[in-house]
């Protein structure tokens, strides 16, 4: 229910539904139902040198990307920036932008989306098989429903300009160890580490 936050809770490193957008992963940490509609929070693990999305802009949401790990490049209008752990990248609604893993190692960001609601786009896109598994008409209809304009023609130029690939390879969030590939859920208690030298 939008407008009314739920009870307090802790989302641990093994919690949160996982998805794959065809380019980058997504782990759902807080939805509009959790925050009274104020914002949603997702984690995006990115494989090395991958373009996360075509050039795009949002009608309804501002996005804030907090870099947890790796180097994340961002094209914000005409401005190119590279962010490293601890940096926050602001992507205001209405501005054309994209982002990518600018390094040769995995990268991770926390994406704060305000107001909430766009996390439902990520869920639906993941359920469709991501941008590479869904029919283009399905992606276009979903994008229109969520006020997202995407320029798929920008992909080849972005890949060449920034030395990245599209689509990406699926990565799970750091510390995630699913045991059932059908559910992608990890056990409630992590396994004990293996003993070295035993």
Image: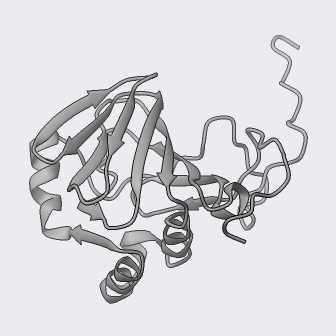
Counting from the top left corner in percent of width and height, residue 194 is at 84, 24
Counting from the top left corner in percent of width and height, residue 50 is at 32, 46
Of residues 46 and 42, which is closer to you in this image?
Answer: 42
* Rendered position, 33 above or below 133: above
Counting from the top left corner in percent of width and height, residue 178 is at 74, 50
Residue 18 vs residue 12: left or right?
A: left
Q: Quadrant of the C terminus?
A: top right
Residue 116, image quadrant: bottom right
Q: Residue at point 17% right, 40% down?
A: 163
Residue 130, image quadrant: bottom left
Q: Residue at point 90% right, 39% down?
A: 189
Q: Residue at point 72% right, 57% down?
A: 34
Counting from the top left corner in percent of width and height, residue 126 is at 52, 69
Q: How many marks?
A: 0
* Rendered position, 172 above or below 33: above
Residue 57 vs residue 133: left or right?
A: left
* Rendered position, 51 above or below 155: above
């Amino acid at each position: 229910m939008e407008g009314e936050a739920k009870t307090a809770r802790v989302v641990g490193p093994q919690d949160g539904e996982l998805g794959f957008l065809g380019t980058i992963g997504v782990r759902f940490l807080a939805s509009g139902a959790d925050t009274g509609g104020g914002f949603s929070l997702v984690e995006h693990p990115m494989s090395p040198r991958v373009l996360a999305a075509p050039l795009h802009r949002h009608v309804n949401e501002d996005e804030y990307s907090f870099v947890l790990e790796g180097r994340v490049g961002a094209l914000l209008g005409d401005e190119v920036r590279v962010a490293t752990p601890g940096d926050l990248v602001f992507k205001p609604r209405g501005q054309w932008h994209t982002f990518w893993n600018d390094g040769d190692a995995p990268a991770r960001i926390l994406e704060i989306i305000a107001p909430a609601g766009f996390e439902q786009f990520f869920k639906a896109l993941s359920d469709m098989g991501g941008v590479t598994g869904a029919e283009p008409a399905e992606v276009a209809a979903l994008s229109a429903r969520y006020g997202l304009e995407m320029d798929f023609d920008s992909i080849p130029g972005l890949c060449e300009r920034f030395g990245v690939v599209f689509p990406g390879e699926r990565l799970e969030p750091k510390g995630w160890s699913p045991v059932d590939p059908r559910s992608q859920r990890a056990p409630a208690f992590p396994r004990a580490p293996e003993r070295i030298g035993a």
